[in-house]
């Protein structure tokens, strides 16, 4: 999401006469797009702010701005920092040129007003990924779920869906410019809902996420379509039916579980049970047997017992995740968990449980990859492998990284590869065609 937002910011600034430079030491304006999901993410920003102080001493006239979620959450504290000139929340990017123009007056500038309508639908993002193969398309903003541990609804506002015509136009433009893959982004894409009665609607019927997914897939069979993130309570059969219908919709679903314990899920306000989650996985595997599942897991949430932890390990085994994003719980100020629940799992226990989760996921990833040995997979080439210019690297429809001899192939090609070996992280193979 921050990559997508940064591309919107770059578009706004380019229209105001700014240009992107390759080295931070050459910049006259530094903007940091921030995340507040975990405390560690914020700590990194404070460290960067200290670094910017040294830059400002060497570069007269350097302007520093903090954008995004941290700007929304900690605006007063950020403005107290001598190095910070501008603070702008996630819905204030259009105002950046005005804020910059006002700086010479000597006052620090701030705009952290959250919007009920802003989706930046009319802004064409300036792509920062130079491979020209894959791109993000933000389809909605905000979140209405209010999971007890999460700051997103407070710093990014309530859910609002983007005009689907603008999404289709962006996807078509990307494909016409040579991109081969788009990822539809939202805090909860499955709750995308564009009403036909909405202002400036060119559609005579409501557009759900499954319908939007179908329309993007119909642009071309040569355009891969991904999406993230899905909330288990909203992941319905209509999305799966659309995926079955279109082979260019990638066979990968990111479905955060967070915990395998019903009592923890209830305290997290996740609005589904372990059984309901596993039934959803069962339906996915039945309708899309070649689909991989990835997830998010929090270790050591408030009140988590050893049995709760074991329940998480067991749901991981049942799900057979091919990869996971795994973190220790860090209490976020102003959330329900911070206000009403005790962060009572000792740090050493959190760390121990996280290490167990990571170890199990490494096993599951290896099992998932070994299942592909001898299989033929289609790889979309994204670049050279990290180890050798004689090898190319790309991803399969299942979002698995695959490395193979380069030969005459190039970035952006679809290549048929037979998998000959693997690790827990990657597939390796030989070119078939």
Image (cartoon, rainbow, N blue to C red):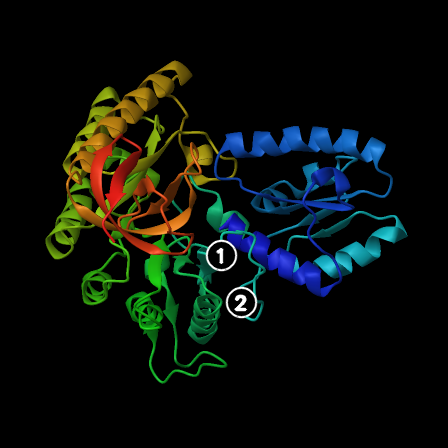
Give how far across and how far down residue 207 sits, in percent.
Answer: 34, 74
Give how far across and how far down residue 272 sits, in percent.
Answer: 24, 47
| Category of crowding for the residue at label 1, using alpha-carbon neighbours closer than 10 angstroms: few (below 14), some (14–19), many (at least 20) | some
How far is disc 2 from disc 1 in space, using C-alphas?
30 Å
Vertical relation: 45 (above or below) 165: above
Residue hosting label 2? 117
Task: Residue at 18% x, 63% y: name it.
Answer: 244
The residue nearer to you, when weighing 228 against 204, is 228
Vertical relation: 165 (above or below) 307: below
Vertical relation: 307 (above or below) 157: above
Task: Residue at 58% x, 31% y: name it.
Answer: 44
Q: Residue furthest left?
A: 286
| Category of crowding for the residue at label 2, using alpha-carbon neighbours closer than 10 angstroms: few (below 14), some (14–19), many (at least 20) | some
SS assignment at label 1: loop
Residue hosting label 1? 132
Q: Residue furthest right?
A: 105
Give how far across and how far down residue 359 sits, in percent.
Answer: 27, 23
Locate residue 387: give its quadrant.
top left
The residue nearer to you, when weighing 270 against 350, is 350
Q: Is residue 143 left or right of residue 227?
A: right
Vertical relation: 203 (above or below) 211: below
- Closest to the camera, between mark 2 and mark 1, is 1
Q: Is residue 228 left or right of residue 39?
A: left
Task: Residue at 24% x, 33% y: name it.
Answer: 422
Q: Is residue 95 visible?
A: no
């Amino acid at each position: 999401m921050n990559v997508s937002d940064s591309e919107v910011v770059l578009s706004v600034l380019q229209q105001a006469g700014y240009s992107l430079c390759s080295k931070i030491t050459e910049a006259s304006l530094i903007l940091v797009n921030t995340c507040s999901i975990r405390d560690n993410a914020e700590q990194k920003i404070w460290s960067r702010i200290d670094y910017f102080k040294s830059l400002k001493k060497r570069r007269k006239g350097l302007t520093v701005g903090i954008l995004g979620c941290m700007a929304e959450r900690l605006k007063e504290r950020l403005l107290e920092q001598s190095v910070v000139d501008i603070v702008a929340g996630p819905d204030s990017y259009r105002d950046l040129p005005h804020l910059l123009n006002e700086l010479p007056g000597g006052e620090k500038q701030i705009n952290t007003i959250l919007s009920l309508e802003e989706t930046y639908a009319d802004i064409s993002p300036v792509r920062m990924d130079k491979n020209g193969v894959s791109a993000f398309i933000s389809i909605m903003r905000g979140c209405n779920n209010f999971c007890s541990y999460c700051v997103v609804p407070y710093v990014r506002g309530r859910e609002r869906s983007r005009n689907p015509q603008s999404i289709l136009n962006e996807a078509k433009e990307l494909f016409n410019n040579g991109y081969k893959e788009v990822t539809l982004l939202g805090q909860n894409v499955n709750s995308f809902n564009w009403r036909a009665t909405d202002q400036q609607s060119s559609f005579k019927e409501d557009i759900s996420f499954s319908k939007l997914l179908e329309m993007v897939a119909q642009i071309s069979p040569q355009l891969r379509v991904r999406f993230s993130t899905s909330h288990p309570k909203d992941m319905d059969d209509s999305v799966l039916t659309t995926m079955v219908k279109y082979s260019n919709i990638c066979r990968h679903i990111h479905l955060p579980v967070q915990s395998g314990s019903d009592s923890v899920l209830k305290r997290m306000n996740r609005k589904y049970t372990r059984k309901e989650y596993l039934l959803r996985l069962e339906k996915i595997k039945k309708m899309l047997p070649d689909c991989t599942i990835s997830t998010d897991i929090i270790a050591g949430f408030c009140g988590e017992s050893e049995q709760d932890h074991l329940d998480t390990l067991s749901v991981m085994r049942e799900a057979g995740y091919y990869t996971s994003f795994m973190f220790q719980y860090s209490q976020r100020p102003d959330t329900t968990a911070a206000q009403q629940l005790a962060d009572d799992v000792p740090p050493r226990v959190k760390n121990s449980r996280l290490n167990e989760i990571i170890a199990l996921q490494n096993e599951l990833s290896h099992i998932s990859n070994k299942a592909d040995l001898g299989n033929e997979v289609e790889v979309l080439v994204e670049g050279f492998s990290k180890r050798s210019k004689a090898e190319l690297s790309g991803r399969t429809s299942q979002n698995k990284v695959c490395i193979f001899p380069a030969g005459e192939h190039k970035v952006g090609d679809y290549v048929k590869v037979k998998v000959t070996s693997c690790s827990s992280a990657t597939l390796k193979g030989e070119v078939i065609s």
